[in-house]
Amino acid sequence: MTAGARTLVPLAWARTTPSPPPLGEGNPEGVEGATPRKPRPVSPHPRLRRYFPHRGKRVAPLPAFGRTPPKGGRESSPWKWAALALILAACDSHTSDEAFGKRVRAYLLSHPEVLQEVGQRLDAKLAADQLSDQKRAETLLPSLRSAVERDPRDFVANPRGAITVTEFYDYRCPHCADAAPKVLKLIHDNPDVRFVFKEMPIFGPTSEHAARAALAVRKDGGDSLGLYQAFMSARPLQDDAIDPIAHAKGARPGDLSPTASHAFNAQLADTTGLFNRLSLGGTPAFIVGDRIILGEDMEAVDAAVQKLRSKKA
């Protein structure tokens, strides 16, 4: 599994449910009988507010996860600093042993290198967890190949291509937008690459609206590739622009209405379930043969395509 710049499922959703946000009437977890839940703003515990100054404001998506680490070092993870804040909070004067809490707090403030060691341990644990997810996803991938590559509801560019690349993306994901011109170039320059588009909205209602509109264009035989380019070029795509663009690209008005959303929501729920089973965790994510490539690492995608091509030669 290769990791590049990408956007993880926003923290506000991760804190309320283990799956990405609900998709209208659909079931994001693919669990029979599950009740969709609305994402709630995350408010920090009162004892943590000194460390989290947003004081109950809705938590925004976490772009720090998607940025490429600076040269010469790793970028600090928001999760790391949240964990360090919890350590300090545990030493708060309101603990049952006030004197002990004060002594530990004073020690940590006098020896911040301890916190650095905790951060390093946390980084190691997160890396181990990612490796575990990678192994599990690689084990599952052969059994999910049909769902990943051959769902007849998905839009496919170069449908007769011998090499299949699948992308999971969100139109409001900045890293997906950055990768989009390279995706279009890959499709244009390589007619033997069969490219599967998987709508994976992780940024809430506007993203869900855009995904449903894209599925409507696909259903109505419109210009899906042109819509992909238009939506990704908006940066960021606004809700009031979605239907006019979709209509211009071939969607019928009836398929853009709320009453037509049920079937589209079902497809999005299926894609979300697949996304979760593969532990992809963020967008963009590419699957090329037996490789999972996380983030906008198009060089890795190109290399994986070349490797498959050489095998088929």
Image (spheres, helix red, strand yellow):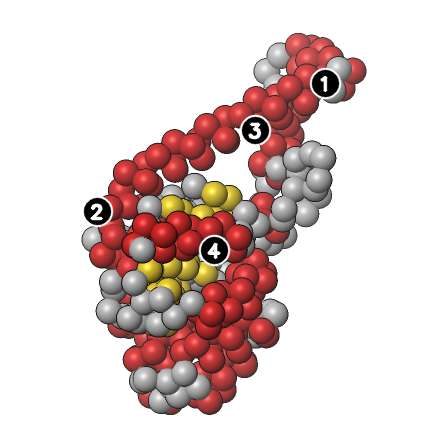
Q: Amino acid at mark 1?
A: Glu
Q: CA distance from mark 4 to mark 3?
A: 29 Å
Q: Secondary structure at mark 1?
A: helix
Say which of 308 and 153 sits in front.
Answer: 308
Return the x and y of residue 11 as percentages of the image width and height.
Answer: 53, 47
Q: Nearer the viewer, mark 1 or mark 3?
A: 3
Q: Amino acid at mark 3?
A: Asp
Q: Secondary structure at mark 2?
A: helix
Residue 145 higher or lower than 214, as above or below: above
Question: Residue at label 4?
Answer: 302
Residue depicted at x 63% and y 46%: 68
Answer with mark 1 or mark 3, whichever residue precedes in sequence.
Answer: 1
Q: Nearer the viewer, mark 4 or mark 1?
A: 4
Q: CA distance from mark 1 to mark 3?
A: 15 Å
Return the x and y of residue 23 as percentages of the image width and height.
Answer: 37, 63
Q: CA distance from mark 2 to mark 4?
A: 24 Å
Residue depicted at x 33% and y 60%: 163
Question: Residue at label 2?
Answer: 143
Question: Residue at label 1?
Answer: 113
- Judged from this view, the residue extending furthest toward the front is 313
Q: Which mark is residue 211?
A: none
Location of residue 216 by image quarter: bottom left
Q: Nearer the viewer, mark 2 or mark 1?
A: 2
Q: CA distance from mark 4 to mark 1?
A: 42 Å
| Residue 239 visible | no
Question: Residue at label 3?
Answer: 123
